[in-house]
Image (cartoon, rainbow, N blue to C red):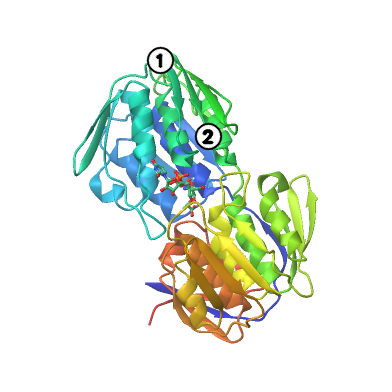
């Protein structure tokens, strides 16, 4: 198990290019199964969750390889419709394969996807949506089997679930009917998935709004004749707004200044608005954002996580850590996941003053953090502990960094590029 050794108190600054989004790369790779062909996915982050998705595609008969930051997936020979249990338990996003396997083969079998420490993470919205679209779904203790073709019609989601929206978009291209999905999630990654699906020849529109229309066309997904073309689709993944917010928080909390390239402010307006409420100077350009930390950070007051365009839950742990050093009292209300304050105990070990009352974290500011040995328990909570180490006086050791490897490519290298004093070691 690797760990990070971090020397805190050094202002971060300089320039960093934001990578492609984990939460777009995963559904896009799943969607590649729906369209037989050779797919070039550019700006694909080299992160553990993507490597697991590669294993899933390979287990179904596809072949994949990285060429730099381009992932080439050849899905012409998908010959299985069951995602192996071992990989299912390692990553929740394997649930996306239901939609793309139904689109490709008319059947799909998965085991129940793992939840993780941030919540139960059921998939009832996915299942109910598939049934409303006309698929047969059998659920046993262990497995979920779905089969059939999309009958079209209207599907109303009870909650704008990101994954369910993406799964149903993919399943809806099967059959020859029109499907309207309402109360969809509007995250930018969904518009990105739509962009990839349209590149594959599928007729999908409305991605990024609450209403998505999919017109099934069985011929749309036909692949190229084997060997006839070098590449069937080339696509660039949207930039990672969560990675951007994480690095920006690192610069803000250490009193630094940096320019982030390959990020559009429009993808993270609410995050930037909260930073500005804290006294941070934000300058936005076409595809870059400059962050200048304020002399003294102020509490942003009350922040409530909500579906896009609200404040993203994936930035909540990082903001919570930032608020330990801000003037005044902050309340952060986590409305999306039921247990996403896993890093609170570790932050208290470093001197933070945090109370959890139900969905609310109450953070007393101006509590200088002191270095300590802490343990990452999940992806974004782990990243928040690295930020705490950068803000703290002295040395911090963050253990179990494999959680962080799931969603941040070379996190330590990126932070060092901005002047952070951090190195990766094998845990003693
Ligand atoms: C996606 O997860 C992201 N993951 C998450 O990012 C992100 O936090 C989340 O959306 C919300 O933005 C990927 O895109 C790979 P949801 P997903 O379905 O699709 C409940 C990260 O750190 N729900 O919108 O699983 C669910 O339990 C990860 O990068 C049901 O009750 O999120 C949760 O409370 C973490 N039934 C809420 O809805 C369902 O069938 C939001 O879940 C589905 C979801």
Q: Against 389, is 116 above or below?
A: above
| Circle 1 Cα neighbour tier, 10 Å, few/some/many (<14 / 14–19 / ≥20) | some
- Secondary element under disc 1, as helix, strand or loop, is loop
Contact between labelled residues 1 and 2, with CB atoms less than 8 Å apart:
no
Q: Nearer the viewer, residue 47 or 178?
A: 178
Q: Is residue 185 above or below residue 277?
A: above
Can you give x and y, in whole percent of width and height, for residue 122 in the image?
35, 46
Label annotation for residue 275? none
| Residue farthest to the left, as pictured | 141
Of callouts 2 and 1, which one flags the residue occurring earlier in the amino acid sequence? 2
- Which residue is at a point 53% across and 37% down the rendered structure image? 185
Residue at 42% of width from left, 23% of height from top? Answer: 172
Of the pair 389 and 112, the residue shown nearer to us: 112
Res 76 quadrant in image: top left
Horizontal side of residue 290 vs 127, given as left or right: right
Q: Which mark is residue 193?
A: 2
> Which image quadrant: the C terminus?
bottom left
Nearest the camera: 9 or 211? 211
Q: Position of residue 394 (x, y in %)?
A: 59, 87
Cβ at disc 2 under 8 Å from ligand 1: no
Can you see residue 96?
Answer: yes
Residues at marks 2 and 1, CA–CA distance in whole angstroms: 19 Å
Total labels drawn: 2
Report x, y in % for residue 372.
Answer: 50, 84
Q: Is residue 416 visible?
A: no
Using the image as rendered, state which of residue 273 and residue 101 is in the foreground: 273
Secondary structure beneath disc 2? helix
The quarter of the picture where residue 256 lies is bottom right
Look at mark 1 in the image and give the residue it sits on.
218
**Residue found at x 70% / y 49%:** 269
- Furthest residue to the front? 357
């Amino acid at each position: 198990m690797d760990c990070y050794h971090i020397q805190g108190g050094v202002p971060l600054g300089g320039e960093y290019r934001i990578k492609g989004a984990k939460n777009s790369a995963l559904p896009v790779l799943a969607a590649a199964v729906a369209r037989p062909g050779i797919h070039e996915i550019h700006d694909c982050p080299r992160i553990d969750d993507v490597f697991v998705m590669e294993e899933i595609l390979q287990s179904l008969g596809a072949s994949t390889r990285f060429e730099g930051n381009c992932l080439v997936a050849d899905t012409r020979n998908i010959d299985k419709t069951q995602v192996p249990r071992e990989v299912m338990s390692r990553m929740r996003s394997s649930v996306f394969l239901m939609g793309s396997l139904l689109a490709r083969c008319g059947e799909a079998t998965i085991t129940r996807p793992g939840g993780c420490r941030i919540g139960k993470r059921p998939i009832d919205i996915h299942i109910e949506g598939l049934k409303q679209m006309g698929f047969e779904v059998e659920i046993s203790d262990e497995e979920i089997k779905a089969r059939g073709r999309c009958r079209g019609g209207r599907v109303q989601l009870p909650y704008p679930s990101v994954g369910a929206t993406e799964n149903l978009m993919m399943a809806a291209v099967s059959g020859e009917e029109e499907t309207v999905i309402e109360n969809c999630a509007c995250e930018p990654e969904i518009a990105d998935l739509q962009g990839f699906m349209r590149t594959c020849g599928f007729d999908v529109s409305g991605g990024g709004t609450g209403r998505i229309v999919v017109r099934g066309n069985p011929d749309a997904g036909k692949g190229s004749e084997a060997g006839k073309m070098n590449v069937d689709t080339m696509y660039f993944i949207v930039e990672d707004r969560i990675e951007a917010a994480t690095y920006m928080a690192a610069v803000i909390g250490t009193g630094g200044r940096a320019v982030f390239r390959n990020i559009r402010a429009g993808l993270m307006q609410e995050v930037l608005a909260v930073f500005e409420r804290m006294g941070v100077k934000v300058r936005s350009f076409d595809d870059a954002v400059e962050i200048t930390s304020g002399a003294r950070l102020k509490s942003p007051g009350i922040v409530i996580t909500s579906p896009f365009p609200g404040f993203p839950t994936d930035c909540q742990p990082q903001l919570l850590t930032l608020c330990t050093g801000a003037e005044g009292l902050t309340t952060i209300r986590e409305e999306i996941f039921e247990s996403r304050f896993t890093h609170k105990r570790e932050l208290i070990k470093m001197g933070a003053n945090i109370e959890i009352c139900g969905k609310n974290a109450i953070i007393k500011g101006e509590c200088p953090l002191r270095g300590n040995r802490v343990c990452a328990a999940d992806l974004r909570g782990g990243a928040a502990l690295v930020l705490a180490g950068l803000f703290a006086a002295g040395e911090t050791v963050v253990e179990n960094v494999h959680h962080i490897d799931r969603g941040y490519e070379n996190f330590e290298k990126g932070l060092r590029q901005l002047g952070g004093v951090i190195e990766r070691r094998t845990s003693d």
